[in-house]
Image (tube, rainbow, N blue to C red):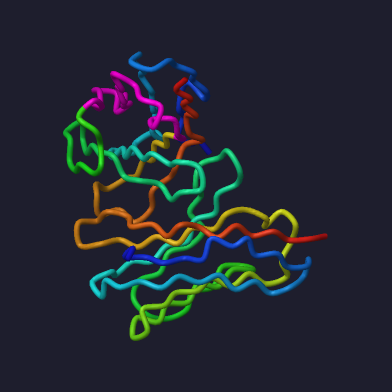
């Protein structure tokens, strides 16, 4: 079965650079979520999109922005990167909007900011 | 104090043992309770979810919710080395956001 695809899998950036993470949800899934997970921490919800519209916002810094495109893939744009942005970034998708109880997670993008 | 408390472990048990993983929570409005398994360097994988109090069984896994005590458990029978992973509990609040526990690292020794 198709899963959530994230690219790149690994990314190394320097401070103050920008990064773009991509997420391709499971086909026919209409909702995408972004999470940030620091070492040894639980995932922190950043932002979600339902049917290409931003639906909920969590602890996403103002330096980050995201969008969902017409083909339902989503991109997380991160600017002015800081050392503390080093983390695993997960995308999850679901079907049926935010009330869906089953989010399927991608393998994550490991971002390292030097 | 976090809304969801989970002992980070590690919890080390011999192969074949019954494993008990637990979380407590403070928000009585939580309705949906999930257990995710996360292998190292991989994304969380939904194992089970339950609604309200009661038990739910799926193969070697049993999820238990006690809303009166604000306590949920995941039991793993006949544990295997391949069960070694971090297990995260998560609960859905009234805004349909997932509130996560810290995760318990489980090690099954052959």
- Residue A46 pos. (x, y %): 29, 40
Q: Is residue A81 magenta?
A: yes
- Does residue A71 appear left or right of residue B95 in this picture? right
- Residue A1 pos. (x, y %): 53, 38
- Residue B14 pos. (x, y %): 78, 67
Q: Is residue B19 magenta?
A: no
- Does residue B82 appear left or right of residue A110 in this picture? right
When the figure is inspected, residue B101 is found, relative to residue A30, above or below; the finding is below
- Closer to the camera in the image, A15 or B77: A15
- Closer to the camera in the image, B32 or B103: B103
Quarter where residue A47 is shown: top left
Q: Residue at x 30, y 73 (%)?
A: B26
- Closer to the camera in the image, A90 or B3: B3
- Residue B96 pos. (x, y %): 24, 56
Region in magenta = A63-88
Quarter where residue A51 is shown: top left
When the figure is inspected, residue B71 is found, relative to residue A22, above or below; the finding is below
Q: Residue at x 70, y 64 (%)?
A: B12
Q: Residue at x 78, y 61 (%)?
A: B109
Quarter where residue A70 is shown: top left
Tally of numbered discs = 0
The outermost residue toward the bottom is B68
- Closer to the camera in the image, B7 or A54: B7
When the figure is inspected, residue A89 is found, relative to residue B18, above or below; the finding is above
């Amino acid at each position: 079965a198709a899963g959530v695809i994230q690219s790149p899998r690994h990314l190394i950036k320097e401070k103050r650079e920008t990064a773009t993470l991509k997420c391709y949800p499971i086909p026919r899934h209409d909702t995408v979520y972004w999470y940030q997970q620091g070492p040894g921490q639980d995932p922190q919800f950043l932002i979600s999109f339902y049917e290409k519209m931003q639906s909920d916002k969590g602890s996403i810094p103002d330096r980050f922005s995201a969008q969902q495109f017409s083909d339902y893939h989503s991109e997380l744009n991160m600017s002015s990167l800081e050392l503390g942005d080093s983390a695993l970034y997960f995308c999850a998708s679901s079907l049926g909007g935010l009330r869906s109880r089953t989010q399927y997670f991608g393998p994550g993008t490991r971002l390292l900011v030097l | 104090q976090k809304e969801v408390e989970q002992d980070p472990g590690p919890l080390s048990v011999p192969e074949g043992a019954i494993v008990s993983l637990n979380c407590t929570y403070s928000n009585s409005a939580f309705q949906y309770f999930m257990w995710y398994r996360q292998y190292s360097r991989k994304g969380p994988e939904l194992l089970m979810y339950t609604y309200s109090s009661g038990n739910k069984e799926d193969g070697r896994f049993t999820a238990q919710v006690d809303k009166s005590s604000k306590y949920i458990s995941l039991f793993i029978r006949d544990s295997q080395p391949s069960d070694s992973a971090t297990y995260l509990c998560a609960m859905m609040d009234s805004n349909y956001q997932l509130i996560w526990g810290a995760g318990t690292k489980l090690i099954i020794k052959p």
